[in-house]
């Protein structure tokens, strides 16, 4: 069934039996605000006998007051498809492609593609706009939903501003696909059920900033109807400006300009009902125009959430 609420972060953390315990490097962390609700979404394999769930969730809190906050954002989705609409005809194999442009330098730590039973290949790669040099981030030639996972890089990949990120996946809606949930095959559209299909890639990332004067606190990676609270901290009294921009650099929406803030933590209510669906980021600047905080989010419809 449905989870009963719209999460601020769809995949705050992902684990499967092939993955060891995650230990973030010194100076990095994932935010978890006071009174947060954590939903455990567990996939079970069939056994035929009653069993007891022995799952445990173990968290280690850091002592440092300031760290670089790691986000997990679904930057590939149906809103940046180049071949639309997302529909998989019966008895067909079809490939979908999407792309986005990196709006500023990013440190990419992991990727997680997500499709269901009709998906059978994935390829995620980057391309430099000037040199056209490409780099494969992830390639899967035999996608198996039962072993979907997040793929962590041995070393973070630096994505420079202007880099094009592409995702290609093929869906097999024929009886050659032994995982096809329909016999005979039927047309498949977007949906969270196993007899429907998804097309998402989650990116675990950290914005690269030379300035660490201020920091973002816990903020959503997915926003419904453009309404959310932007939380940040500043170490001193100062005037600040906040702007929302799309990844293409074509749209800019000022939230406030040169507004005075006192030292400490702050929460600003943002409401942009007419924001087109897609990838965006926030920039918090000081009076000299220096970027203090960057935060990436995706503006989505509720039905897109997995």
Image (spheres, grey):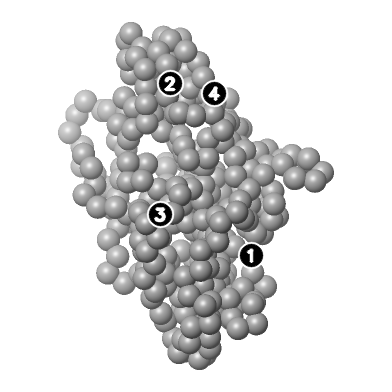
Circle 3 is placed at which residue position?
274
Marks 1 and 3, how far apart in space? 29 Å
Query: In the picture shown, does residue 199 fall above or below 69?
Result: above
Residue designated by label 1:
208
Q: Quadrant of the N terminus?
A: top left
3D distance between C-alphas at marks 4 and 2: 9 Å
Residue 264 falls in image quadrant: bottom left
Q: What is the crowding at mark 4: few (fewer than 14 residues within 10 Å), some, or many (at least 20)? A: some
Q: Earlier in the sequence, mark 3 or mark 4?
A: 4
Residue 13: horizontal and vertical position, in percent?
A: 42, 53
Instruction: Pick whichever, 185 or 288, lies toward us.
Output: 288
User: Could you say which is closer to the camera, residue 3 or residue 236?
Assistant: 236
Does any portion of residue 35 appear in the rendered image? yes
Q: Residue at x 42, y 69 (%)?
A: 230
Q: Which residue is mark 2?
A: 88
Q: Are marks 3 and 2 in contact (CB under 8 Å)?
A: no
- Give the Cα distance between marks 3 and 2: 30 Å
In the rendered image, the quadrant that contains the C terminus is top left
What residue is disc 4 on? 95
């Amino acid at each position: 069934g449905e989870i009963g609420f719209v999460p601020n972060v769809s995949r705050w953390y992902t684990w499967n039996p092939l993955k060891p315990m995650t230990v973030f490097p010194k100076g990095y962390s994932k935010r978890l605000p006071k009174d947060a609700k954590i939903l455990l979404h567990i996939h079970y394999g069939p056994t035929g006998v009653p069993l007891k769930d022995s799952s445990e969730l173990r968290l280690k809190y850091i002592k440092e007051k300031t760290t670089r906050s790691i986000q997990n954002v679904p930057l590939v989705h149906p809103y940046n498809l180049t071949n639309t609409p997302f529909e998989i005809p019966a008895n067909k194999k079809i490939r979908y492609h999407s792309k986005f442009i990196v709006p500023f330098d990013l440190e990419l730590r992991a990727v997680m593609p997500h499709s269901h039973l009709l998906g059978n290949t994935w390829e995620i790669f980057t391309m430099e706009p000037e040199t056209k040099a490409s780099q494969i981030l992830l390639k899967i030639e035999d996608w198996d939903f039962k072993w979907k996972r997040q793929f962590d890089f041995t070393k973070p990949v630096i994505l420079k501003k202007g880099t094009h990120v592409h995702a290609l996946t093929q869906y097999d809606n024929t009886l050659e696909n032994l995982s096809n949930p329909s016999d005979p095959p039927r047309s498949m559209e977007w949906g969270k059920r196993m007899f429907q299909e998804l097309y998402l890639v989650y990116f675990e990332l950290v914005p690269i900033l030379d300035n660490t004067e201020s920091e973002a606190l816990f903020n959503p990676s997915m926003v419904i109807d453009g309404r959310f609270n932007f939380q940040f901290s500043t170490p001193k009294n100062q005037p600040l400006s906040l702007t929302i921009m799309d990844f293409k650099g074509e749209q800019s929406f000022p939230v406030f300009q040169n507004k005075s803030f006192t030292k400490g933590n702050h929460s600003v209510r943002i409401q942009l009902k007419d924001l087109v669906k897609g990838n965006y980021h926030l920039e918090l600047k000081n009076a000299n125009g220096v970027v203090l905080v960057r935060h990436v989010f995706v503006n989505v419809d509720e039905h897109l959430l997995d």
